[in-house]
Image: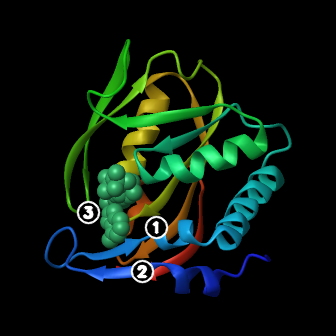
Amino acid sequence: MEFNSEHIKSIIRIVPDFPKKGIHFYDIFPLFQNPAALESVITHITDHIKAQNKEPVDAIVGLDARGFLFGALVCARLGVPFVPVRKAGKLPGQTVQVCYTKEYGQDVFEMQSDAIKPGQKVVVIDDLIATGGSALAAGELVAQLGGQVVEFIFMIELEGLDGTAQLKSPVYSLFKCPC
Ligand SMILES: O=P(O)(O)OC[C@H]1O[C@H](OP(=O)(O)OP(=O)(O)O)[C@H](O)[C@@H]1O
Ligand SMILES: Nc1ncnc2[nH]cnc12
């Protein structure tokens, strides 16, 4: 199936007042019920990364938990490693940590200390950017390990929260939606 952003948008379900009153929640899981549409999204992201980078990137970084779904599929296509950013307490061994604030709460992210080597170039992938707190925190973990985020990729960017403004690397969002 050709990538059609209007079609993909129509598949995503909007749930009012979840997980808190006032939050307009974008539920991406209906996309995973539609293999052809999901395939078009993964192909679109993969083609974008290949077009942006003459040399293959060193890794794809995916954010716990929905970013794992997109990140792992994309890295398998590209043939590059996948690095998880996990919520605190889930990763064994030595980790680096950062506290952050997102649209509906606060959390702590961790990355394994040997997951990225100094100088490596990575792409950070997540399903959605709202305030940008999660993505900013992921970028800080990459920087703590001496890596470089060459691009942040989101399927959905929520407009009105200015989440991308604080990110220090280029951003590519497949589509923008009201918050
Ligand atoms: O831009 P922000 O305001 O930081 O919000 C965006 C983040 O919030 C959601 O994750 P959540 O922490 O709910 O985790 P989940 O994927 O496990 O549901 C979403 O998947 C992003 O990672
Ligand atoms: N409005 C929203 N919908 C889905 N995931 C989110 N993560 C942060 N804000 C969100």
Q: Is residue 77 left or right of residue 136?
A: right
The disc placed on residue 13 is 2
Q: Picture quarter containing residue 118? A: top right
Please state the horizontal and vertical placement of residue 93, each as a whole percent of the image: 38, 12
Mark 2 is on which residue type? Arg
Q: Mark 3 near mark 1, Cβ–Cβ under 8 Å?
A: no
Residue at the outermost top position: 93
Q: Is mark 3 within 8 Å of ligand 2?
A: yes
Q: Picture quarter containing residue 78? A: top right
Question: According to the image, label 1 marks what residue?
Answer: 29
Mark 3 or mark 1: which comes first in sequence?
Answer: 1
Q: Is mark 2 within 8 Å of ligand 2?
A: no
Mark 1 is on which residue type? Phe
Please state the horizontal and vertical placement of residue 46, each as a whole percent of the image: 75, 54
Label 3, label 1: how many angstroms apart (C-alpha)?
19 Å
**Going 86% across and 43% down the picture, which residue do you hit?**
54
In the figure, 124 relative to 24: above or below? Answer: above
How has the structure been colored for display?
A: rainbow
In what quadrant does ligand 2 lie? bottom left
Callout 3: helix, strand or loop? loop
Front one among 122 and 32: 32
Q: Residues within 10 Å of mark 1 (few under 14, many from 20)?
A: few
Question: According to the image, label 3 marks what residue?
Answer: 103
**Going 56% across and 23% down the picture, which residue do you hit?**
116
